[in-house]
Amino acid sequence: MTAVATPKFEAANERKKSRRGFFLALPAYVYLSLFFALPLLSVVVYSFAKRTSTGGVALEEWNIDSYTKLGEPIVRDILLRSFTLAIITTVICLVLAYPFSYFLATRKASTRNIMLVFVMIPFWSNFLVRNYAWRVLLGNDGPVSRVTEGVGLGETTILFTPTAIVLGLVYGFLPFMILPLYAAVERMDWSLIEASRDLGATGMQTFRKITFPLSLPGVIAGSILVFIPSLGAYVTPQILGGGKKTMLGSYIVTQFLTARNWPVGAAVSTVLMVVMLGATMLYFRKGGRTL
Amino acid sequence: MAGNAKQLKGNTRWALGLNATLVYVFFYAPIALLILFSFSDDPLVGRWGGFTLDWYRAFGENEEVQSALGVSIRVAIMSTVVSVVLGTMAALALERYRFRGNKFFDALLYLPVIIPDVTMAVMMLLFFTIARNAASTIFGVDVSKGVWSVTVSHIAFSISFVSIVVRARIAGMSEKLEEAAQDLYASRWQAFRYVTLPLILPGIIGGGLLALTLSLDDVVITQFVAGPGSTTLPVYVFGLIRRGVSPLINAVSVVMLAASVLLVLLSLVAQRARGGDVT
């Protein structure tokens, strides 16, 4: 005997399902609240705390000193440098990844899958080691130097400069641009491009008015995925920048581990999180939902 | 003029093909050279001095490297097991049910994926310091950082990655199969055990391998939450690199890279098993 689907029965069923879902999610919910949301909140709280003379933190006397400190020339330079390098990295990745993704999307399925796997490997594999490889390549007697010497350009001296940092960041994060971009280009309605061509638009016009707008969600997603980690980069500036010109990531680390000025470190981290949240919200507002 | 828009014309095709080739060379040439130099019998890195396995032998005999490797493996296994269970449950909850607060939970689950390493590292350091102070004032016990705090942090970011991969798998699967099982008098547990679980298993395995890779590769967060005696291999190597390059680091790097590439490939194979399409 099957139950008749009365509204009351349906509602009770819905409630039961809802409760079941809640209990399934509960362990991860509790874990992330305790070991992710709470730590995140404590960083925000500490950014308003006062640094005591001994390097400790006084929570009672809360203030915004740490944020006003962000306007000081030294910190402002670091912020500016980090934003500049992150933007340059994002633009280079976009310029390399767009034609790549377009090409990828036009291959036949079997070729495409193989090509994709070879993008996924650097996407997930060890970031530290991949940056270290460039340290070896760019070193004094490294192969890059010998090639430039061979063609008469002299020794390569880009190691420990901002150029090397950008190179390392592009190398590290290029797959983060390719994958969402490819997903967007592959998914777009290609018949619109055909229609545009049939109606006599030039290649450039088709790209500007049809292809690019259609792939915009991928462009935004990829740019966010490259920009955010570039802005907070720590490993790359340490290995390839030699830690000479400080960037945001290194500055935060210094405030926490050596300078023992936790409120300032927390304030910079909070700014980084706000930028991240802003970028993510912009992305979801634009209606994209890849990756 | 009807033609396939995916058909590229001469020049465009040539230019795009060249760009793609250069991108792959850019991706793989540095790795290939690093592998080559790890076999080079020259104390200067980046120089070819004949074939040798000395650096790999040094890797095997170096006690600090071996103990760091041991810590890495222990942390990776523990964090993977926990994050696979929690991440899979979260994925099932979000894909199959609507419950109060599911939107907020969804957002909370995405955050660890996009938050920069350094920010998460600082968060965890602060949290463990506060927790330690609280524990010593309230209970009078000393809970200093160690393998446990590294594991707790790795679980915190791995849950999200596991749940994303598993969700992709569940999304591609029809709910009808579970309903059919229950119509045929399977209990909810039986329906899960014999229908749902086998179908989403490739996703769970893929997600688990990814969690393993992420845990074995993490350096920034681990560096902040590791205590004495809980140095993992990447943290140890990062410390070495900051003091300078050496052929030993080349060899250790190649081993680490090989491990992570192997795990990634296995993960991709698992995710694609039986027609599952995961981007």
Image (cartoon, rainbow, N blue to C red):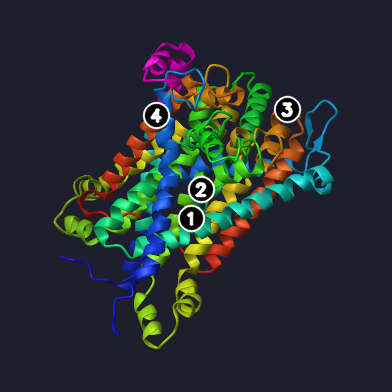
Identify the residue under disc 2: A173
**Is residue B64 located in the magenta-colored stretch of the structure?**
yes
User: Mark 2 near mark 1, Cβ–Cβ under 8 Å?
Assistant: yes
Query: Of B236 and A24, which appears nearest the observer?
Result: B236
Which one is closest to the eye, mark 4 or mark 2?
4
Q: Secondary structure at mark 4?
A: helix
Q: Residues within 10 Å of mark 2 (few under 14, many from 20)?
A: many
Task: Reply above or below: B232 against A95.
Answer: above
Mark 2 secondary-structure assignment: helix
Question: Which chain letter goes with mark 4?
Answer: B
- What is the span of residues highlighted in magenta in the rendered image? B49-78
- Say what amino acid the circle numbered 2 marks: Phe
Q: Give the alpha-carbon distance from disc 4 to disc 2, as whole Å.
A: 24 Å
Outermost residue to the bottom = A199
**First-in-chain label (1 vs 3):** 1
Front residue of this view, candidates A84 and B76: A84
- According to the picture, the residue beneath numbered tag 3 turns out to be A258
Check disc 1 and report the residue beneath it: A177
